[in-house]
Image (cartoon, rainbow, N blue to C red):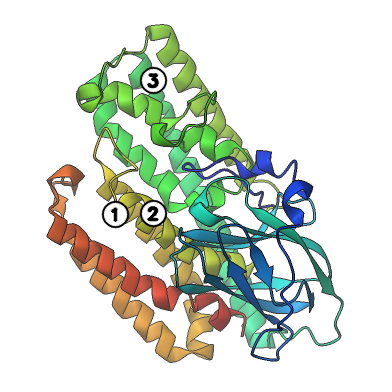
Amino acid sequence: MIRTLSTRRSRVPLAVLALAPLALAAACTENADPGDSGDPRVLAVASTADGCELSSTEAPAGTLTFDVTNAGDDVTEFYLLDSDGLRILGEVENVAPNTSAKLTVNVGAGDYVTACKPGMVGDGIRGDFTVAASDDDGSAPSASDSELVEQAQTNYAAYVEDQADQLLTGTTEFAALVKARDDEAARALYPQARQHWERIETVAESFGTLDPEMDLREADLEPGQEWTGWHVLEKDLWPEDATDYTALTDEQRATLADKLVADTETLVELVNAPDMTYPIDFIANGSRGLLDEVATGKITGEEEAWSHTDLWDFQANVDGARVAYEGVRPIVLENDADLAAELDEEFADLQTLLDAQREGDGFVSYDTVGEDQRGELSDAVNALSEPLSRLTAAVVA
């Protein structure tokens, strides 16, 4: 699969920032102290406000584990990128100060780029990383494992294609309603159409600037950046909470709606490309990535600032994470049955809390959800995130 380091909706476009990686390369350095494990495929990463220190900037090919520790004051992220500084091979997000998180990813011989992103803003602190060829890549699956991996990859590709197709159908209808100024119908369709985006968000995010062009929030706009996509139309449909807001003209609405449809068509083309594949570690890491999306955007209510339809997105992210997990679950059962049992239980517990917020065919408005209930949801997300952080290691073991 071609994954490109893209913008997050809340952050400066890394795809753009990747155009000048060398300026920051010197700040991402090799620590004099090696990792404690003695395993050359296990690397320690120390992220600080102005540094991104790796226990080694070299490793043998195979399954690599980056143990990322945040020694700074802000939440951070860590990326492993291809040599072009654009294509994402693996990422771990939302690493709070004084905590750690692991990124496990299969990597072949070649040159790569590492990046820490303290504060989850800016272009990240980058450095070169080299993977040497190895006779023992430490990740060769058994014959039965290979069959399970192939089945998981085939099923996940079909799921992504189906969700993208449904997204295009919903987006096209939504755009027509917006242009016709049938606002009541557009507001009703908005969260239903978006759920297909949220279920495959980690895939959509990988396509360069497509994610920010379709899903950027107003609060995350950079100076001079054009605002397009779902959320500018969301604000125009729900202007009640806006201050000194000037409604979009018919022409502005039409331009934005048409672009949203065109961008969705591009997404559909990309996920249906003949060379599109989903490595097994990407599927597993994507499951955790979707839970990270819940933790960073949905729990806080920042995602749907005007419509307050966050719980629709929350459920869709959980749906996508669960589907990705269930696709690799047969492999997890082979390698770590206890982890599979723990994930089953945590997914069920989180779903019970979400179901308590249902109303009709959807969910209650998120601004009516009390702090205690938000806290329970947050605790359940955190409880699920921990075993999900071990999923990739179990899949590629």
Location of residue 276 with respect to 48 vertically, above or below: above
Residue 344's spot in the image, x, y percent?
A: 34, 78
Q: For mark 2, does the 10 Å Cα neighbourhood hold few (<14), some (14 to 19), or many (20 or more) residues?
A: some
Residue at 70 percent of width and 89 percent of height: 39
Residue 67 visible (yes or no): yes
Q: For mark 3, does the 10 Å Cα neighbourhood hold few (<14), some (14 to 19), or many (20 or more) residues?
A: some
How far apart are the alpha carbons under marks 1 and 3? 31 Å
The residue beneath circle 1 is 299
Q: Nearer the viewer, mark 1 or mark 3?
A: 1
Q: Secondary structure at mark 2?
A: helix
Residue at 43 percent of width and 28 percent of height: 172
From the viewer's side, name the closer residue of 206 and 123. Answer: 123
Q: Secondary structure at mark 1?
A: loop
Residue at 74 percent of width and 60 percent of height: 127
Pick the quarter of the image with the C terminus.
bottom right
Question: Mark 3 vs mark 2: which is more N-terminal?
Answer: 3
Location of residue 48 with respect to 254 vertically, above or below: below
Q: Amino acid at mark 3?
A: Ala
How far apart are the alpha carbons under marks 3 and 2? 31 Å
From the viewer's side, name the closer residue of 310 and 278. Answer: 310
Q: For mark 1, does the 10 Å Cα neighbourhood hold few (<14), some (14 to 19), or many (20 or more) residues?
A: some
Is 374 left or right of 178, judged from the image as shown? Answer: left
The residue beneath circle 3 is 176
Q: Amino acid at mark 1?
A: Ile
- Residues at discs 2 and 1 in contact (Cβ within 8 Å): yes
Question: Mark 1 vs mark 3: which is more N-terminal?
Answer: 3
The residue beneath circle 2 is 296
Residue at 61 percent of width and 57 percent of height: 50
Residue 1 visible (yes or no): no
- Residues at discs 1 and 3 in contact (Cβ within 8 Å): no
Residue 64's spot in the image, x, y percent?
A: 68, 77
